[in-house]
Each structure stands twice: as C-alpha cells, then as structure tokens.
Image (cartoon, coloured by chain):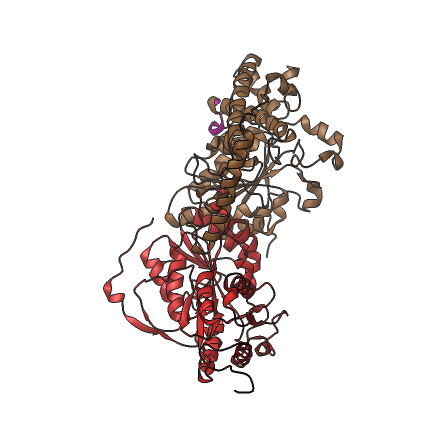
Chain colours: A red, B brown
C-alpha cells in the first residue's frame, strides 16, 4: 500500500485532449502512481464507462483494481466508504448525477462524517465522479445540476472542472486528497473542445477559484459548462466596452469566497451564472457573501443568472432553461447601466 | 427445467433448560472460551444496567439496551481474529468489548463525545452505526479491500431484523454473492424493530432465506444459545478466510428491554410475551450448563460480580470525569486540514469558547460537589440477574 510507482519520463508528452480524455488520463496517472487507487462503478470496466471515461483502465490495471459493480448506487457509495476507511483510494463512477440520490444517505450520513465522528481515526479518501448538467438532449433524469445539495454538506468537497486542463489537474488532486470529493463532470463540454495537456501528474489545488480573465468593470462568477457561455459573454461585453473579470469557482465547497470578494472589490459589480435552479443555489451563497464582505464596493446589486426554479425540462425545452450568452450580456449591460463604469462614461441600454 | 429446491438449516446445541441437545463439536468445546464468554455476557449485562441508570439520572444520552442479546455479540467477538474488521450496529457492546473497545469509550460515545469512537484498540473497526443497515455497505467495502489486497481477513457486520427490509441489506447480500466476498452478516432477529414486530416486518418464513436470492449460504441459529452462534460464526469465518464467500446468519433472540431509553415497549408489547421470553434468555442457560459441567459455581459467580461491579464503577468514574472537547474542536476533523474558507468561522467559535471558559472558571471557583453513583452488587438482584437470586 501507498506504493508510489515512478512514472517514466517518456509518458510526459503533451497531447490535445477533450475533457473526457483528460479525465481518463488523470485516472490512468493516479492508478499508476499508487496501487491504492481503484476504480469502480456500473459498466466502467469492460465497457469503459458509458462515456468511455474509464476506457482501457481494466486492460492496463486488471479486474482487481477496475471493477464492474452490480447496478446498485447505494451499494457503490457504501462499499466505497468501506474501502476508503480500510486503506484504498476508491474512485467510483455514478453513471449520471440523476442516479446519485440513492447514494445520498451514505455520502451525507457517512462519507462526510467518518473522519469527524472517529476524531480522525478512520478517513474517507474517496472520489465519486458523476457526469451532470443539461444541454445534450439526454433522457429524463440525466440533466439536472444539483451540486448545491452536496455543497450544503460539511465534510464533503465538491469540485467541478470547466476545461480539459482543469479536469486533469483537479481530478488528480481530488484522488490524492484525504477527504471525500464529489467530482461533477459537466458532460455538455466533455467533447466540446480540446486543450494541450501535459501528462506530468501536476494537480491543481482544491479550495480555490481561478480567474480565467482579468477585467475591471464587472465580475462574472460561474463554473462547469456555463463557463463556456460566460466567457463568450465576456468577449461580447468587452467589444461593447464592458471589461469583465471571469472567475471559475471550480471548488464549489469549501468555497474560496476571498478570490470572488477581492475581484468584486476591484470591479464593483458581480453576476453569478449557473445552470442549477436559482433558489438556494450556490449563487445565493456567493451573492450573500459578496453583500456581506464587499457591500461598500458594490455599484449595483449582485445578480444571478440561473436556471429557473422549475423541474429541468425534457430536452425539447432545455435550451429555454439554460442561461444563454444573450441573457448574460443583456443583464450585464443592465447592471452596468445602474452605475459608473470605472474611468468611463455610464453605459446604458440605449447608448449601446 | 426441473424444480429447484432450497433449504435453510437451523442450528441449536444448548436448550433453554441448559442441557445439550447434541454434542458440542470440537471447535466450540474449549472450556476457557466458554468461561470467558460467560463472563463477558455477565459483565455487559451489568454494564447495560448501569448505563440505563446513568441515562435515567441525566448522566448519559439515549442508550439502546442489549438485554437478552448478549450471546450473539459475545460469540462473534470470541470467534473473530484481531485482523478482521467489525462493523457494528448500535447494540453491539459484547462484540465491541471483546474487540478491545473499553467500557469508558462506550460510555463516552453514548454520553455525546465523538472521541468515544476513536478506539484505542481495534483501530480499523467501524464506529457504532446509527442509520439502519448502512453499515452493511461499509463491511462489504472492507471485504472488497481484503480481496483486492489479497489479505485473508473477513469483515463481520451485524444488524437487526428491521434492517433486513432495507435496500442496503439486500444490495450487500447481492454483491457478496456476485463477488464471493469474505463477509459474515449476522442478523440479531430480536423480534422487534422499535414497535414493529417481526411478523409484519417481513413475509418470509426466515430472514436467513434472503441469502438464497443472493446466492450465498444462509443459516438460522438459536441466538440465545452461545454455542449455536459460536459454531455458525466460526464456520462462516473459516469459509471467508478460505475465499469461499459470504454467509448470512440469522440469530433468533428477543429484545428484553425497550428499543432505547427513549422508548416504552409496554405501549405496544404484551407483558405475557415478555415474561415468556425471559425463560429463554441466554445467560441463565449458559450458567446452568457451566455449573452442571462443574466449570462454574455460585461462589465463582459472586466473586466475579464483585470484580465486575468494581470494573464498571471505575469506567463510569473515568467517564464522568471526562470534559467535553473545546467547542472549536468541531472543526478539527472536518477535513484533513482546515480549509482556508472556514478559517473565519473557526476563529469566531474559538474566541467565543475562550470567553466562555473564562466566565465558567470564575463561576465555578469554590463550588464543588460530587454525588456517589457507584453500582453495588445488590443493584443487580433484579432485571436480568434473576438467575442469580434464584440459585
């Protein structure tokens, strides 16, 4: 146990990879790094996962470390906890986030609490991976974004990558972390773009947000697939003379308020963009913290652009549910219309 | 296709009258083991009585009595090896004690201290599990770990018969069958899940037959006969060590006490039924056998109770002297390290706790009284020690 297998330098080649491929690469790296890392879930071994995130791992690491489980999410979570407490580092896949609810009792009732209730004697260094979010015309129950459920549970970490590079680095850090991590993969951007990834095993720190773009008029805060719309909106706004800072939250919990608050102190405006329903969403938490800690700096109310407080519609209507680039741009302009742009004339709807 | 036939075996060695129904096989014939088992059962029954008294006087939180079920846990604890892993439910004082959990640790746990689950010994055992049947999954995970790492250990998990209605139980049996896990599941079928009787918990004739659907061995044993449980658990462990898969043991017993100290079983349970169940209880039965075999005597009983009372009183005293951890300790083991985003909340509580500590120190200077709550041998004359006063 805890045996670190040295990675040969020849593997450190840079490749252009999709998020899905980078998840696969990170799993591969973690499994070669430590024999304690095992992968389990429904259809993940022989089939390589319904999205192929675990492709080839069984051939490379064998059936003892890459396990096809019976179809039982409660069991998957329960045994993952048991394995983690006994010295393994299990990475379990829940096929879609919509099926994770059967595992909640285990994750909330045990994974989150085991370290605390045994005063550090037993720990749960486990990762639960689940594809989540809408926008790919998937069947019912496959498209919700319910990260806030987990973010509300002390003891769990909730991590959401927004690019292939961050998926690689964050997943490695999640697997190496000695805490239970819910790693939610925005499946809409699984294959949407590729980035240059060096397979160097570099992790990206948890507990912190990332500034993807510097700006001075407004802070746009988002995560997961919505980063794509948010970045596009930021570009359009830039063209209209509104300079946006874009923050990728990445670690939904524990949440790095400081980076967001510091950014808002600089820009004076804040918009949170997320796919999940609005009420009691993570956006509410961010808006509240910004109001508490950056109130004197605010030139406009913090606004939230989110999914509606409705059931995520089946795919004929899902585009109407998901926040669009247009909507982000419109509300950003409106928000800026409420105050002075830093060092520039006031921008109003009419003048644009 | 021809008809498939399945059967469930029922095992019993020692009858309620303390006489052997059939000869004891060699693996459960060790006389020292019998005596250690008997002493454990008596000790835990006395502990149980004291724990209830502590709760009634506001010195312990809600407590689930093990009264009447002592043979099952004792047999499990005696049979397990130290390198196995135990995943208890919440009525498992006998097994926990034999595994190395101290009486003080048990009291700390039921007295509201998390550190009661930070066992000094049996460091890999799971803590008491409150959410019903969820511990089955953890035990399965431990069994998977042993299998993955090529270790010849077993995971042993217990639950009540109410837990067998839950998905966790059935999913675990199913996995154990599919993966041939080194797992032993022992159901304490004590007839009552709070107020729900066995007959409306499940329509199957036995709980053990749920094993058939999972493709593992299921067996029913007399849970008030130490030897029956012992034989079944030893057999199941041997099988697990040899890589021959999991076993479900249904140990039929009776919950002689309330569900917990917060419950009043007289609201839903017939007094006659309870009275009849007392005739089957496990300690008197084993004592009769041991006395008949000249392994034990009333004089030995008397001497042992004296030691027991002393031991329990020492544990209680040590428990009552334990102070709560400082309030800010609620952050200490939340994550591996305190995440930066939580530093403010931690600092806030730490400051409040420092102020409070100062205030308390001022208030308490001068006031110091401690009433004696020691257990006496005479306290044990009723409620579970009838056999003592009869003989």
Q: Main secondary structure of the magenta part?
A: helix
**Residue extending furthest toward the top:** B299
Residue A248, can we see it? no
**Residue extending furthest toward the bottom:** A351
Q: Is residue A37 magenta?
A: no
Residue A145, can we see it? yes
Q: Quadrant of residue B382?
A: top right
Residue B167: give x, y in percent of width and height. 59, 52
Query: What is the magenta range?
Result: B26-31
Front one among A95 and A172: A172
**Residue extending furthest toward the left:** A9
Residue B79: give x, y in percent of width and height. 47, 33
Instruction: Give the answer, above or below, for where A215 lies relative to B55.
Output: below
Instruction: Give the answer, above or below, for where A45 lies relative to B200.
Output: below
Residue A333: give x, y in percent of width and height. 53, 80
Q: Quadrant of residue A67?
A: bottom left
């Amino acid at each position: 146990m805890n045996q670190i297998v040295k990675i040969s330098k020849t593997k450190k080649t840079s490749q252009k990879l999709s998020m899905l491929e980078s998840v696969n690469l990170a799993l591969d790296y973690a499994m070669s790094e430590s024999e304690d890392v095992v992968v389990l879930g429904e259809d993940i071994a022989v089939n390589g996962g319904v999205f192929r995130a675990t492709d080839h791992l069984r051939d490379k690491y064998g059936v003892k470390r890459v396990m096809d489980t019976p179809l039982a999410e409660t069991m998957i979570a329960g045994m993952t906890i048991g394995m983690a407490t006994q010295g393994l580092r299990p990475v379990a896949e829940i096929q879609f986030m919509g099926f994770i609810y059967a595992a909640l009792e285990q994750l909330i009732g045990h994974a989150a609490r085991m370290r605390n209730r045994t005063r550090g004697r037993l720990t749960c260094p486990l990762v639960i991976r689940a594809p989540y979010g809408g926008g790919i015309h998937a069947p019912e129950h496959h498209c919700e974004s319910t990260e806030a459920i987990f973010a509300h549970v002390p003891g769990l970490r909730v991590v959401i990558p927004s690019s292939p590079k961050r998926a690689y680095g964050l997943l490695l850090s999640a697997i190496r972390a000695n805490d239970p991590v819910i790693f939610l993969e925005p499946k809409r951007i699984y294959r949407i773009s590729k980035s240059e990834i060096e397979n160097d095993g570099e992790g990206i720190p948890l507990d912190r947000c990332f500034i993807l773009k510097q700006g001075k008029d407004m802070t746009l805060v988002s995560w997961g697939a919505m980063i794509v719309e948010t970045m596009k909106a930021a570009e359009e706004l830039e063209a209209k003379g509104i300079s946006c800072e874009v923050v990728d939250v990445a670690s939904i919990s524990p949440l790095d308020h400081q980076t967001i608050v510091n950014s808002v102190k600089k820009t004076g405006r804040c918009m949170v963009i997320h796919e999940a329903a609005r009420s009691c969403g993570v956006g509410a938490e961010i808006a509240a913290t910004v109001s508490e800690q950056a109130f004197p700096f605010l030139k406009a109310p913090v606004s939230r652009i989110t999914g509606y407080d409705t059931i995520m519609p089946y795919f004929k209507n899902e585009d109407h549910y998901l926040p669009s680039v247009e909507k982000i741009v419109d509300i950003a302009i409106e928000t800026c219309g409420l105050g002075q742009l830093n060092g520039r004339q006031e921008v109003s709807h009419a003048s644009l | 296709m021809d008809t498939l036939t399945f059967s469930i075996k029922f095992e019993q060695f020692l009858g309620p009258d303390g006489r052997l129904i059939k000869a004891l096989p060699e693996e459960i014939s060790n006389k020292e083991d019998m005596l250690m088992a008997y002493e454990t059962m008596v000790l835990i029954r006395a502990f149980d009585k004291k724990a209830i008294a502590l709760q009634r006087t506001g010195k312990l939180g809600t407590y689930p009595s093990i009264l009447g079920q002592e043979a099952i846990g004792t047999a499990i604890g005696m049979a397990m090896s130290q390198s196995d892993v135990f995943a208890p439910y919440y009525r498992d004082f006998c097994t926990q004690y034999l595994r190395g959990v101290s009486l003080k640790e048990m009291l700390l746990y039921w007295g509201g201290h998390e550190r009661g689950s930070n066992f000094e010994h049996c460091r890999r055992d799971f803590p008491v599990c409150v959410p019903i049947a969820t511990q089955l999954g953890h035990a399965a995970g431990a069994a998977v770990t042993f299998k993955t790492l090529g270790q010849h250990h077993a995971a042993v998990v217990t639950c009540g018969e109410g837990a067998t209605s839950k998905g966790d139980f059935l999913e675990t049996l199913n996995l154990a069958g599919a993966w041939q896990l080194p797992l032993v599941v022992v159901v304490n079928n004590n007839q009552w899940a709070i107020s729900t009787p066995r007959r409306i918990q499940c329509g199957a004739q036995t709980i053990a037959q749920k094993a058939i659907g999972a493709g593992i061995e299921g067996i029913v044993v007399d849970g008030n006969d130490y030897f029956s449980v012992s034989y079944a658990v030893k057999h199941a462990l041997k099988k697990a060590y040899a890589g021959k898969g999991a076993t479900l043991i249904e140990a039929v017993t009776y919950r002689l006490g309330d569900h917990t100290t917060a419950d009043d079983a007289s609201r839903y349970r017939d007094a006659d039924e309870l009275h009849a169940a007392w005739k089957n209880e496990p300690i008197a039965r084993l004592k009769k056998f041991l006395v008949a075999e000249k392994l034990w005597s009333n004089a030995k009983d008397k001497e042992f109770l004296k030691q027991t009372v002393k031991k329990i009183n020492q544990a209680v005293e040590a428990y009552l002297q334990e102070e709560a951890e400082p309030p800010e300790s609620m952050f200490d083991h939340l994550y591996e390290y305190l995440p930066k985003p939580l530093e403010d909340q931690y600092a806030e509580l730490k400051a409040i706790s420092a102020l409070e500590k100062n205030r308390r120190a001022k208030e308490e200077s001068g006031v110091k009284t401690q009433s004696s709550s020691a257990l006496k041998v005479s306290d044990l004359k009723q409620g579970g020690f009838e056999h003592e006063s009869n003989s």
